[in-house]
Image (tube, helix red, strand yellow):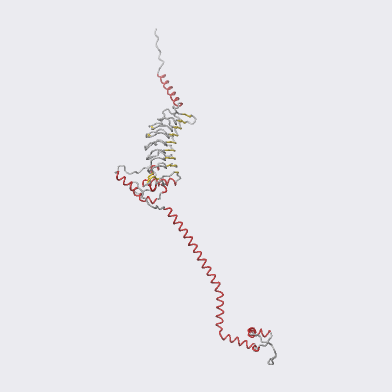
């Protein structure tokens, strides 16, 4: 008697097994942690720092939000390297050996807010390397060998508020590259190879507007030419850039207003090398022995005007005081002089006739005045001429000489 082996593996059983295996794999992936890494579930962070890694781990937990990959030996970030961690918010790749970043290196990181790429060997960045990071707020590119910033086109980094590019090899930055970052509030530019010639006038204008609106920057310190070495670009007087105005852009004058768009008008790349070198040499600032600061000149004019005004006011006050004093003194001396002149004129008007009449009146009133005899007090009061004679002439001794009428 032969027994047939029953076939219990139908199509339904195969589907259930496939579903069960997928769930087990997902659970294993969600709960697994890469080798040489430390996973902390409460904070959803993974720490793979200082492990000598040469590439990005592939089996990262999908729910990771904070990833530490600093102090390793990672040389490159391939395309879609973090596609398995879509919830990532903070990524630290500092102190590695990064030389290049693939165009889609950060593809899928729509929630990334902090990206640290400092202390690497980056020399250039693709223009679209940050296009997949719409929520990025902090970007640190300092301590690299970057010679030119990428052009941030469109609405890629509208939320970027903090940018650091210190200790690189930047020589110039066009204002349109920074105008594409409308939310930028903190900018670090120090310790680059800034060449403060005509090509940096656009950056000077943008930085002044940026600082005026409340932005924070550590300044642009010139490395060339020698006359401006060590000087801050914002402190270079405007009059030294007058020769640069017709040379910037495409041969037209510089526009002082900043465009709203982020389009970059660069000179044609097919221009002959000799013409390019000639224009760059013409753009170099001419050395001046004693550069004049317009602000200092205006301050000097204002101070001189104030001093002259004060001196003129003091002289006017002194003149008014002197005139007033002279008028008072003249008035006080004029009254006695006028009285004396009036008396003198009165005497001159009377003349000799008045004098003779006065003497005749005296003689008629006092006929015995020449005999020098004493009279009563009533006669003296009646004869003023006699009284004057008595006072003016010495009185003779009184004796009876026989000729007296007494």
Residue 188, placed above or below residue 316: above
Question: Which one is in front, 249 or 241?
Answer: 241
Give x and y (percent) for residue 9.
Answer: 40, 17
- Residue 343 vs 242, above or below: the answer is below
Residue 94 image-quadrant placement: top left
Return the residue nearer the eye: 400 or 171.
400
Q: Quick one: 321 or 7, which is closer to the camera?
A: 321
- In which quadrant will I find the C terminus? bottom right
- The number of callouts visible is 0
Image coordinates of residue 63 in percent, x first then y, are 45, 30
Residue 253 image offset from top left, x and y in percent: 35, 49
Q: Is residue 149 left or right of residue 383?
A: left
Tell me the quadrant of the picture where the N terminus can be found.
top left
Q: Position of residue 376 (x, y in %)?
A: 69, 85
Please identify the quarter of the rendering in which residue 272 is found.
Answer: top left
Furthest residue in direction bottom, as rendered = 402
């Amino acid at each position: 008697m032969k027994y047939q082996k029953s076939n219990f593996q139908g199509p339904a059983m195969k589907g259930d097994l496939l579903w069960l295996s997928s769930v087990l794999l997902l659970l294993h992936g969600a709960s697994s942690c890469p080798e040489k890494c430390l996973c902390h579930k409460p904070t959803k962070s993974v720490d793979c720092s200082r492990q000598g890694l040469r590439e990005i781990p592939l089996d990262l937990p999908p729910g990771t939000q904070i990833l530490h990959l600093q102090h390793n030996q990672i040389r490159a970030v391939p395309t879609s390297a973090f596609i398995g961690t879509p919830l990532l918010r903070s990524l630290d790749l500092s102190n590695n050996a990064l030389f290049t970043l693939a165009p889609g290196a950060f593809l899928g990181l729509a929630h990334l807010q902090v990206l640290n790429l400092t202390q690497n060997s980056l020399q250039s960045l693709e223009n679209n390397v940050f296009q997949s990071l719409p929520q990025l707020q902090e970007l640190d590119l300092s301590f690299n060998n970057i010679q030119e910033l990428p052009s941030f086109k469109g609405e890629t980094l509208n939320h970027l508020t903090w940018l650091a590019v210190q200790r690189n090899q930047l020589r110039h930055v066009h204002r349109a590259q920074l105008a594409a970052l409308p939310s930028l509030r903190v900018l670090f530019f120090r310790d680059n190879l800034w060449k403060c010639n005509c090509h940096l006038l656009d950056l000077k204008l943008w930085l002044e507007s940026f600082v005026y609106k409340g932005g924070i920057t550590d300044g642009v310190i010139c490395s060339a030419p020698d006359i401006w070495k060590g000087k801050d670009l914002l402190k270079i007087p405007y009059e030294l850039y007058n020769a640069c105005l017709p040379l910037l852009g495409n041969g037209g004058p510089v526009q002082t207003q900043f465009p709203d768009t982020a389009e970059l008008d660069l000179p044609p790349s097919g221009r002959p090398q000799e013409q390019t070198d000639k224009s760059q040499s013409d753009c170099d600032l001419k050395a001046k022995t004693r550069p004049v600061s317009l602000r200092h000149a205006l301050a000097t004019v204002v101070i001189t005007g104030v001093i002259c005004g004060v001196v003129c006011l003091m002289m006017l006050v002194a003149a008014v005081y002197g005139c007033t004093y002279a008028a008072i003194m003249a008035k006080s001396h004029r009254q006695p002089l006028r009285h004396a002149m009036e008396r003198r004129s009165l005497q001159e008007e009377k003349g000799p006739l008045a004098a003779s009449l006065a003497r005749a009146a005296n003689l008629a009133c006092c006929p015995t005045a020449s005999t020098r005899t004493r009279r009563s007090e009533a006669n003296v009061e009646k004869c003023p001429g006699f009284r004057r004679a008595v006072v003016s002439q010495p009185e003779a001794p009184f004796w009876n000489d026989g000729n007296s009428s007494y």
